[in-house]
Amino acid sequence: MTTQRPASTAAERDPTLASAVAKVKRHILPLFVIMFIVNYIDRVNIGFVRTHLEHDLGIGAAAYGLGAGLFFIGYALFEVPSNMLLQKVGARIWLTRIMFTWGIVATLMAFIQNETHFYILRFLLGIAEAGFFPGVIYYFTRWLPAVERGKAIAIFLSGSALASLISGPLAGALLQIEGMGLHGWQWMFLIEGLASVFLCVFVWFWLDSRPHDAKWLSRAEQDALVDTIDAEQRERDAQTTVKPSIGQLLKDGQILLFCVLYFCIQLTIYAATFWLPSIIKKMGDISDLQVGFFNSIPWLISILAMYGFAALSARFRAQQAWVATALLIAAAGMFLSTTGGPIFAFVALCFAAIGFKSASALFWPIPQAYLDARIAAAVIALINSIGNLGGFVAPTTFGFLEQSTGSIQGGLYGLAGTSAIAAVLVFFARTRRATHEQALETSPAPTALGKSH
């Protein structure tokens, strides 16, 4: 069998393909980054209004934690079905629908009256957002050659880092608004939610579902893209004859390990995301705007650290060791945050952020190197779904602890221990695909779900 030339070589030899790839990246990447920023802000903005919800609506720590976490239950349950529907109806329709519905639900958060409303809307927000992340990844597979997708995904993921920087100052500024019978926290939900609704109108007119629908590409560029991507797909089809079901995937110990590792990483990320503003408020008599700016500091530090770790891991190739190092930094920071006052805790959490955000970025090359290309999209969606359940466990546990004990110290100890255990487990993760592919060859016939990605 003749091996397909790498897409980079093909692009260098084919100016038409190179021109098409450059146009695609210029056309879609900025929009997807903006969508991800808006998406992430609507997901985590409740962290900045926790004390307001308690004061105005009587939503205590336990209820806040449960509501924050319920988002991830809806998200996990509907992520894979949403991605299957995207492939049936087309990316343009489905990504616009996702953004419109999450914008509407995020806007309705401004009008909650009690805990029940809070729970229902957080769960519905998870359902509405489900499928966005894997949907964008799938979109890349239909528009970019394989060699270009990694860079595109890295740029897309930068949206969450930028959102972490922006969300605090933005929320702090919006919380200053009072008028028309609405509190600042209501204006924050209203403005940020409606921003998503209005943006989806632009998405509808800007996105195309297929390269041959793109009027901003010449016919030759459309054909070059489609021919290259189809050739890569035929090569993947020739490399393996079996597409396993989700049930069969879960019998693979390595895939289960990937899910556990990502769950541990997300556990720490979302604990910090939802509770950091509350920790900052304990530092002194500071305003909502000051809380927002302080909240940006750990995420800014973590972005710089992520680039540093990425450069080191590229130069000294030992991916498991780098992930373990990052997780140990996270563990140390979480533990140290329990040993001093609020200001020392904030400094320690800045240190922890270096670890858990870097670990999140360093983790993904491990399963990507292990997985067969034909099932990679499905497994990545699975890992992402299960891992994001950490976003349910962390805030729910922290809320229960604060409600029952008056402190989240036990939760911080738990996160430190979890990160340390994950640092050990990561050395059991394999990056070679041979054993995995041999196991798949003996698997029974696939199900429709296995074919969905």
Image (spheres, grey):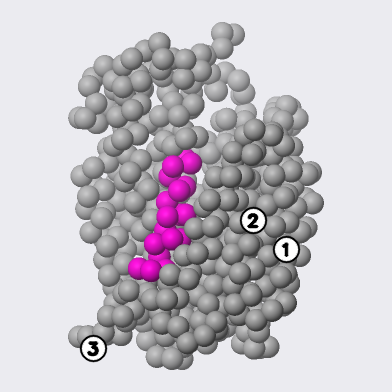
If you read the primary sequence from the N terminus, does the residue marked by circle 1 or circle 2 appear first? 1
Query: Does dot 1 land on a helix, a strand or a loop?
Result: helix
> Residue 449 at x, y = what percent?
54, 42
In the image, 451 versus 290, the foreground residue is 290
Residue type at the position of mark 1: Ala
Total numbered labels: 3
The residue that appears at 28% across and 73% down in the rendered structure is 190
> Residue 100 at x, y = what percent?
29, 58
In the image, 306 versus 228, the foreground residue is 306
Task: Look at discs 2 and 3 and give the one toward the viewer.
Answer: 2
How far apart in space, not on screen, are marks 2 and 3 (Cα)? 43 Å
Q: Which residue is mark 3?
A: 181
Q: Up-down: is 6 above or below 203?
A: above
Q: Is residue 273 left or right of residue 349?
A: left
The residue that appears at 37% across and 72% down in the rendered structure is 171
If you read the primary sequence from the N terminus, does the residue marked by circle 2 or circle 3 appear first? 3
Query: Does dot 3 land on a helix, a strand or a loop?
Result: loop
* Mark 1 touches mark 2? (CB < 8 Å): yes
* Label 2 neighbour load within 10 Å: few <14, some 14-19, many 20+: many
The residue that appears at 44% across and 42% down in the rendered structure is 155
Residue range (magenta): 153-170
Decide whether the magenta segment is chiefly helix, strand or loop. Answer: helix
Q: Is residue 277 left or right of residue 117?
A: right
Residue type at the position of mark 3: Gly
Q: Which residue is mark 1?
A: 332
